[in-house]
Amino acid sequence: MNKLFLKIREIIAKPYFKYVIITVAFIIWMTFLDTNSFQIHNELNDKINILEKKKQALIEETRKDKELIDKLRNIDSLEHFARENYNLKKENEEIFIIEYEENE
């Protein structure tokens, strides 16, 4: 038991041991305990990536909506859009909606 204690004391007495302890403590502090820890940075980076994907999806949706608005500025395109999507018709006009069955 004394030999073990003396060996530990001999290791602790070496000058580089202090630097090892300080380095290990710093790594543990920066990894887990600090408010700017690596774990928090990883979580924030994941959130940033998710938000950037949502932003790209919204930009794409906005681009499609702008194209549709530009297309609907023409009265003929507006009439065509209304007939297809809202089943609107002119007076004294009959519309037949044909639905196809899918073969399973």
Image: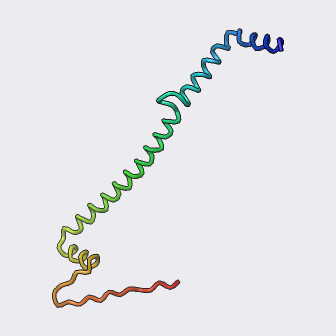
Q: Residue at x 33, y 59 (%)?
A: 61
State the image coordinates of residue 53 (x, y, percent, origin top left): 42, 51
Relative to 15, residue 21 above or below: below
Relative to 93, residue 49 above or below: above
Total label count?
A: 0
State the image coordinates of residue 17 (x, y, percent, origin top left): 67, 14
Q: Is residue 65 toward the left or the right of residue 103 in the image? A: left
Q: Residue at x 23, y 64 (%)?
A: 69
State the image coordinates of residue 62 (x, y, percent, origin top left): 30, 58
Toward which corner of the image does residue 23 lie, by quadrant? top right
Depth check, front residue: 16 or 33: 33
Q: Residue at x 22, y 74 (%)?
A: 77
State the image coordinates of residue 43 (x, y, percent, origin top left): 49, 40
Quarter of the figure with the N terminus: top right
Relative to 31, residue 8 above or below: above
Toward which corner of the image does residue 9 lie, by quadrant? top right
